[in-house]
C-alpha cells in the first residue's frame, strides 16, 4: 500500500494528504485539498468559524466520513484500510452535548467501550471508578445516576471519561466545552490542561473560541472555507499578520477599550 | 327485561364472547408486533423501502374491514372464515401503527446520541439493540397501544366471518333492533379498549420515567414475567383456535339475518338429532356465506333461489319459480359442486308494505293500486333493495311508480319502524317478517309478477352429502315443511320476543314431531 511504504515520520499520528470532502450531490467541497500532520502527544486545535469545515475534518479521522479525494492516514494507515469499528474503539470522541446515552447510568456510559471490547466485569468497574475520579466525579455518588440527573458540566466530564475509558492513544474533541457556562468552562479547561499533562494523549480539539484555542493548543490550525490558512504555535499565532489570525486577535483586544 | 336483568341472565355468554374477543386482539397484536417491529427496523436501515412499505400499510388500513374479510375468504392458509381469517385481517390493520411508530421512534433518537454510538465503535447491531431500540421503546409501545385499541374495535367486525367475539352481540342487536344486545356487546368492547389503552399506557409511562431517574430493576425477573405473559396469551389463543377447528362432522353456516340463522339451526338440530357433531358458523355478512361454502369453510347454508340466480350466478331476473329452481340447481352442480336442496316450503320475497289504515282508506290491494297515489307517498327502502338488479329501479319502472321525492335509503329494520310511525308511507320488507302482523302493516300483491321467486332452500356441498349419510335424509324431511306463516311466527319469536333461535327451533321441531 502506497501510504505505508512512504516516508512516515513515526511521530505523526494523523496525516491528511490532499484531502477533499464534498457530500454526495454537492459540488462545493467542505474540505478542500487539506494537508495536515498531527504529532504524537500534541494538542492540535482546529480553530475557525461555523461552517469552515473543522468538525468535518475531525469526522474524517475516525471514519465517520470518508474523503472524496486524497487520504487520511491514522498511524500510517489509510482510514479506509482500517476496520472502522477497531479504529473508532481506539479513538476517543467527545462532542458538545456529550452525547451520553440517556437510558444508561453514568457508570454504564463510561464503561461502554471496555464492555464492547470484552473486558470482564471487575476490570470494567475498576476502570469506571478510576476514570470518574480522574474527571473529578465521586464514583459512589455518580456511578448509578442517569445523565438527566447531572448538570451540564458533570455530563461533559462523563463524556470525557467515556472517551478515555479504553485508554485510546488518540482523542477527538468537538467543542466539548462549547455549551457550558463560562465558569464551568474555565474550570474544565484548566482541568483539561492538567489532565493532558498527565495522560499525554494525542488530541485534536475543535473550537471557535480563540481563547480556548490559545490556552489548550500545542499548535493552532486556523481554518477558513475548508482550508488551513495558518498552522503554528499559540505564540506565533499572536504575532501572525495573516488576515484571519489578525481578525481573531482583535476580538481578544476588544475588552481593553471598554 | 332491562339491561341489568339481561346481563345477569346472559353473563356467561357475554363473558365467553369477551374472552374470544380478547384472544383475537391479543393474538393479532402479538403477531403485528412480531412482524411490524422488524419491518420498521428494516425500514430505518433501507431508506428506499420506507415509502413503498408505509404506503402499502397505509392503504391496508383504509380498506373497509368487511371488504378485507371478503378478500381473505378464498385465500388458502391465511383466509377462510373463522378466527384465523379474523386474526389475519386484524394483523393487517395493526401493522401500520406498529411499523410507523417503530420508524418514528428509531429516527427520533437524538442525533448526537446516535453519532456518539457510532463514534464509540458500536456495530450496527449493537447500536440497534443497546441504543435505538431502548430509546425508541416508548414510541414503539405507543404504536402498539394504538394497534391494540384499533384491534378491539375492528374485532367486532370479525363476527361477520364467524370468528365470534363481542361483535356477535352487537350485530345481533342491530338486526333485532335490540338495544340490550347492542350494549351487551358494545360496553365490554369499550371497556376492553379502555383497559388496553390504560394498561399499555402505564408500561409506556414507566419506560419514559426510567429515562429520567435511575430505577433499580431486576432484568431477569422482568424478562421472565414478559415471557410468562406471552406464553399464557399464546397458549390461550392456540387453545381457542384448536377448539374452533375441532373435529366437527359438519359445519353449518348462515347469512347474517334472523331467518337464515333459524333455517340453519333447523338443519343443524336435525343433524344433531342423528348423532352428528355440528359446528355453527352463523351470521356471515354479505356474500361471505356463499364464498365460505365454495371454499369449503362451511358445508351447508340456507339461501333463496332468486338470490342465487341474480347475486351469485349473475343471471337476469325471471318470474317462473320452477324454472329458476332448476336453473340454479344445475348451475350450482356444475359450477360449484353444490347440491340445491328441495324448497323448504316458503318464499322470502320482497313485500311491498303500507300501513293497514292506508290500505283500507285508499282501497289498496295490489301494487298497481299504488300507482295513482304514489306522487303523494314517501318511500323508504333498504340499501339492499335500492341497489340490487331486481330492486327499486326495475320495480318503479314495472309499476310506473313515481314517489314523492327520491326514496329514503335506510336500514331495513328501521324502515318498518319508520312506516309504522308514519315517517314514510311505503317500504319494501321481507314477506316472512314477523313484524308485518304485529305492526299493523299490509302486504300488497305483486300483481305484475315483478319480483323473482325467492324460494328458501338449503345449499350443500356434494362432498359433505357423500360423506354424511344423515345429511340427505334430513334435507328430504325438511322439504316443504315450513309455510310462510310459520316462518313469520318463528322470525317473530326471535326478533319480536327476543328469544334465542336455538330454543325457538327446538320448540318448532317438537310441534312438528321431528
Image (cartoon, coloured by chain):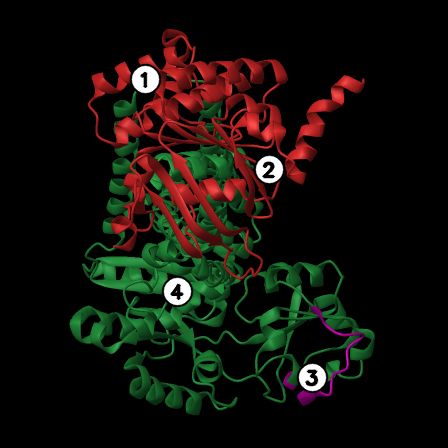
From the top left corner, tell me how far across and down residue A202 is, in percent: 38, 29
Give the residue pinned by disc 2.
A48
Quadrant of the image occupied by residue B131: top left
Decide if residue A191 is in sight here.
yes
* Chain that is coloured red in the picture: A
Q: Name the foreground residue: A232 vs A106.
A: A232
Disc 1 versus disc 4: distance between alpha carbons? 70 Å
Element under disc 1 = helix
Circle 3 Cα neighbour tier, 10 Å, few/some/many (<14 / 14–19 / ≥20)? some
Quadrant of the image occupied by residue B46: bottom left
Circle 1 Cα neighbour tier, 10 Å, few/some/many (<14 / 14–19 / ≥20)? many
Q: Nearer the viewer, mark 4 or mark 2?
A: 2
Element under disc 2 = loop
Left or right: residue B46 compared with residue A122: right
Q: Nearer the viewer, mark 2 or mark 3?
A: 2
| Residues tagged 1 and 4 counted as in contact (Cβ below 8 A) | no
Give the residue pinned by disc 3.
B396
Disc 3 versus disc 1: distance between alpha carbons? 88 Å
Q: Nearer the viewer, mark 2 or mark 1?
A: 2
User: Magenta residues?
Assistant: B394-408
* Chain that is coloured green in the picture: B
Q: Chain of mark 1?
A: A
Circle 2 Cα neighbour tier, 10 Å, few/some/many (<14 / 14–19 / ≥20)? many
Amino acid at each position: 500500500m502506497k501510504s505505508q511504504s512512504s516516508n512516515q515520520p513515526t511521530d505523526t499520528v494523523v496525516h491528511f494528504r490532499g484531502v477533499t470532502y464534498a457530500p454526495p450531490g454537492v459540488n462545493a467541497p467542505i474540505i478542500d485539498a487539506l494537508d495536515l500532520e498531527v504529532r504524537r502527544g500534541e494538542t492540535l486545535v482546529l480553530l475557525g468559524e461555523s461552517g469552515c469545515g473543522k468538525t468535518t475534518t475531525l469526522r474524517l479521522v475516525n471514519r465517520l466520513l470518508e474523503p472524496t479525494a486524497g487520504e487520511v492516514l491514522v498511524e500510517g494507515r489509510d482510514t479506509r484500510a482500517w476496520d472502522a469499528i477497531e479504529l473508532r474503539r481506539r479513538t476517543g470522541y467527545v462532542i458538545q452535548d456529550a452525547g451520553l446515552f440517556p437510558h444508561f447510568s453514568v457508570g454504564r456510559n463510561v464503561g461502554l467501550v471496555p464492555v464492547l471490547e470484552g473486558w470482564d466485569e471487575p476490570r470494567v468497574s475498576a476502570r469506571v471508578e478510576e476514570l470518574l475520579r480522574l474527571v473529578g466525579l465521586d464514583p459512589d455518588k455518580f456511578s448509578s445516576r442517569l445523565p438527566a440527573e447531572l448538570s451540564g458540566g458533570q455530563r461533559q466530564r462523563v463524556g470525557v471519561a467515556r472517551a478515555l475509558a479504553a485508554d485510546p492513544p488518540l482523542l477527538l474533541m468537538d467543542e466539548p466545552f462549547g455549551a457550558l457556562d463560562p465558569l464551568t468552562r474555565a474550570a474544565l479547561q484548566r482541568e483539561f490542561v492538567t489532565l493532558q499533562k498527565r495522560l499525554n494523549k494525542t488530541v485534536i480539539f475543535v473550537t471557535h473560541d480563540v481563547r480556548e484555542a490559545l490556552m489548550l493548543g500545542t499548535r493552532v490550525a486556523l481554518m477558513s472555507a475548508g482550508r488551513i490558512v495558518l498552522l503554528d504555535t499559540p505564540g506565533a499565532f499572536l504575532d501572525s499578520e495573516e488576515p484571519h489570525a489578525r481578525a481573531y486577535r482583535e476580538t481578544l483586544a476588544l475588552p481593553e477599550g471598554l | 327485561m332491562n339491561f341489568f336483568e339481561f346481563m345477569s341472565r346472559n353473563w356467561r355468554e357475554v363473558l365467553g364472547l369477551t374472552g374470544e374477543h380478547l384472544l383475537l386482539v391479543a393474538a393479532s397484536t402479538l403477531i403485528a408486533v412480531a412482524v411490524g417491529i422488524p419491518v420498521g427496523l428494516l425500514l430505518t436501515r433501507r431508506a428506499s423501502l420506507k415509502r413503498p412499505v408505509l404506503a402499502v400499510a397505509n392503504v391496508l388500513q383504509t380498506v373497509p374491514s368487511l371488504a378485507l374479510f371478503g378478500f381473505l375468504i378464498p385465500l388458502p392458509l391465511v383466509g377462510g372464515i373463522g378466527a384465523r381469517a379474523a386474526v389475519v385481517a386484524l394483523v393487517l390493520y395493526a401493522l401500520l401503527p406498529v411499523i410507523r411508530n417503530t420508524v418514528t421512534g428509531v429516527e427520533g433518537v437524538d442525533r448526537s446520541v446516535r453519532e456518539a454510538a457510532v463514534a464509540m465503535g458500536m456495530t450496527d447491531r449493537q447500536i440497534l439493540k443497546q441504543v435505538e431500540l431502548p430509546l425508541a421503546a416508548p414510541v414503539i409501545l405507543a404504536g402498539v397501544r394504538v394497534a391494540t385499541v384499533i384491534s378491539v374495535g375492528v374485532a367486532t367486525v370479525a363476527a361477520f366471518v364467524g370468528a365470534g367475539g363481542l361483535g356477535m352481540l352487537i350485530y345481533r342487536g342491530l338486526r333485532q333492533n335490540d338495544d340490550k344486545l347492542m350494549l351487551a356487546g358494545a360496553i365490554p368492547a369499550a371497556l376492553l379498549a379502555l383497559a388496553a389503552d390504560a394498561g399499555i399506557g402505564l408500561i409506556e409511562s414507566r419506560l419514559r420515567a426510567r429515562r429520567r431517574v435511575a430505577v433499580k430493576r431486576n432484568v431477569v425477573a422482568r424478562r421472565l414475567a414478559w415471557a410468562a405473559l406471552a406464553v399464557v396469551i399464546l397458549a390461550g389463543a392456540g387453545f381457542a383456535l384448536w377448539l374452533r377447528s375441532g373435529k366437527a362432522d359438519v359445519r353449518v353456516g348462515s347469512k347474517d339475518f334472523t331467518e337464515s340463522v333459524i333455517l340453519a339451526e333447523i338443519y343443524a338440530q336435525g343433524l344433531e338429532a342423528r348423532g352428528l357433531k355440528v359446528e355453527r358458523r352463523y351470521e356471515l355478512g354479505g356474500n361471505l356465506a356463499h364464498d365460505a361454502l365454495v371454499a369449503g369453510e362451511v358445508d351447508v347454508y340456507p339461501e333463496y333461489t332468486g338470490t342465487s340466480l341474480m347475486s351469485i350466478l349473475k343471471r337476469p331476473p325471471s318470474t317462473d319459480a320452477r324454472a329458476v329452481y332448476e336453473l340454479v340447481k344445475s348451475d350450482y352442480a356444475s359450477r360449484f359442486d353444490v347440491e340445491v336442496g328441495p324448497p323448504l316450503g316458503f318464499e322470502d320475497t320482497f313485500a311491498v308494505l303500507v300501513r293497514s289504515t292506508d290500505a283500507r282508506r285508499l282501497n289498496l290491494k295490489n301494487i298497481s293500486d299504488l300507482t295513482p297515489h304514489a306522487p303523494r307517498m314517501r318511500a323508504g327502502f333498504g340499501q339492499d333493495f335500492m341497489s340490487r338488479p331486481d330492486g327499486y329501479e326495475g320495480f318503479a319502472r314495472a309499476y310506473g311508480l313515481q314517489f314523492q321525492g327520491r326514496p329514503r335509503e335506510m336500514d331495513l329494520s328501521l324502515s318498518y319502524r319508520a312506516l309504522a310511525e308514519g315517517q314514510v308511507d311505503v317500504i319494501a320488507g321481507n314477506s316472512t317478517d314477523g313484524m308485518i302482523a304485529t305492526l299493523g302493516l299490509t302486504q300488497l300483491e305483486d300483481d305484475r309478477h315483478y319480483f323473482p321467486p325467492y324460494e328458501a332452500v338449503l345449499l350443500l356441498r356434494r362432498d359433505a352429502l357423500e360423506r354424511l349419510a344423515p345429511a340427505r335424509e334430513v334435507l328430504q324431511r325438511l322439504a316443504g315443511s315450513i309455510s310462510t306463516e310459520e316462518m313469520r311466527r318463528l322470525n317473530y319469536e326471535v326478533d319480536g320476543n327476543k328469544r334465542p333461535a336455538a330454543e325457538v327451533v327446538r320448540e318448532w321441531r317438537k310441534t312438528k314431531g321431528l
